[in-house]
Amino acid sequence: MQLGQLKVFQVVAQSRTFTAAAAVLGRSQPAISMQVRALEQELGVPLVEVVHRRIQLTAAGDELLRHVDRVLRGVEALDRAMETMRGGGGRVRIGASATPSSYLLPYRLAPFVRRHPDVQITLSVENPAALRELLESGAIDVAVAMGALDTPPWQGGFEIDTLGTEELSIVLSAGDPRRNRDWTIAELAAAPLVLRESESHTRVVLQRALGHEPRPVMELASNEAVKRAVAAGLGVAVLSRLSVAWEVEAGRLAAATCPDLGGPRRVYTYRGLSRRRLPVEEALWQALHDELT
């Protein structure tokens, strides 16, 4: 069966005469009749009968029409979906580590979403090791993760760009007398630490600065949980400056610096080199970097 034959049958069933169907389709009456007869021959059952010059559907014709209506609606929906994708709409999948997903990407994505209302964005939050696996497997289209200022954490097989730089802050409870000054790495090592999981980039940077694996008083899986623990007085944390800016400004937390943590970090974007890309993926990649301020 061909889609053209199914469309002819649908119009014949709706028009109830071969002549009327031919007028609708802009074809000759014999051509329309031949299409229906060919479809009957292929299916091996009679589909129509002509009674008093009017077409009546057989039981097989009724059943076929029910399926044809559904198939052609599906084809029309498919055509609309493909047209949307050709025009730059559709779905794009982003994976990001915790800090950029919560405190940077919303501001980068908002102008793009306003300009492209037909785009659906999904955002997965994972640690950097998981993000690399997702990107390599094709489960996400773009990955965003923190890394050292001069060396991306992943190299080879990726197109890499940047979204800017960020620094780590020591996060303290509000009113802590050690706020607003430089800490030494020895002071940080001696403090009770509330930290993210061992795979997080912040934890990796801290371990490198300390020279050994830190032993936190509490390990938590999100920045928000870490901030709440620090605010409750359970210890101090090392987090992105972006992630605590609102709380520090509101006086709910305090911050300090530690030059020995290694200075600024860079926010990197990654996508596969060998993948064929939809227009929406290309547009999003361009927009992320066009929105730099």
Image: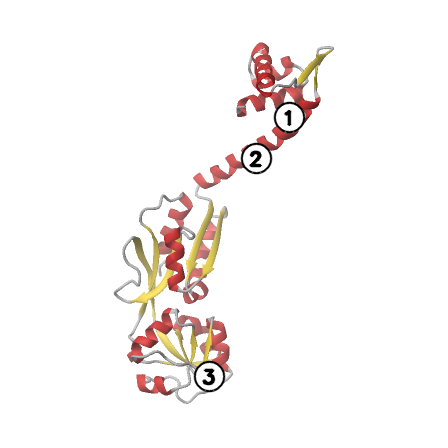
Front residue of 265 and 289: 265
Front residue of 276 and 42: 42
Which residue is rendered at x = 43% and y = 43% of the image? Answer: 88
Residue 239 against residue 273 in the figure, above or below: below
Front residue of 24 and 65: 65
Q: Name the secondary structure under disc 2.
A: helix
User: Which residue is denoted by mark 2 in the rendering?
Assistant: 74
Q: Name the secondary structure under disc 3.
A: strand
Which residue is rendered at x = 29% and y = 62% of the image? Answer: 152
User: Which residue is denoted by mark 3 in the rendering?
Assistant: 173
Name the image quarter holding residue 236: bottom left
Separation of marks 2 and 3 at Cα, in angstroms: 58 Å
Name the image quarter holding residue 240: bottom left
Q: Is residue 101 visible?
A: yes
Position of 46 with respect to 129 (left or right) is right
User: Which residue is denoted by mark 1 in the rendering?
Assistant: 64
Density class for disc 2 (Cα within 10 Å; few <14, some 14-19, many ≥20) is few
Percent position (x, y) of residue 187?
Answer: 34, 87
Density class for disc 3 (Cα within 10 Å; few <14, some 14-19, many ≥20) is many
- The kind of residue on which mark 3 rests is Ser
Percent position (x, y) of residue 234?
Answer: 48, 84
Position of 72 with respect to 184 (left or right) is right
Front residue of 3 and 233: 3
Q: Which marked residue is nearer to the observer: mark 1 or mark 2?
A: 1
Q: Is residue 287 visible?
A: no
Which residue is rendered at x = 39% and y = 85% of the image? Answer: 179
Q: Earlier in the sequence, mark 3 or mark 1?
A: 1
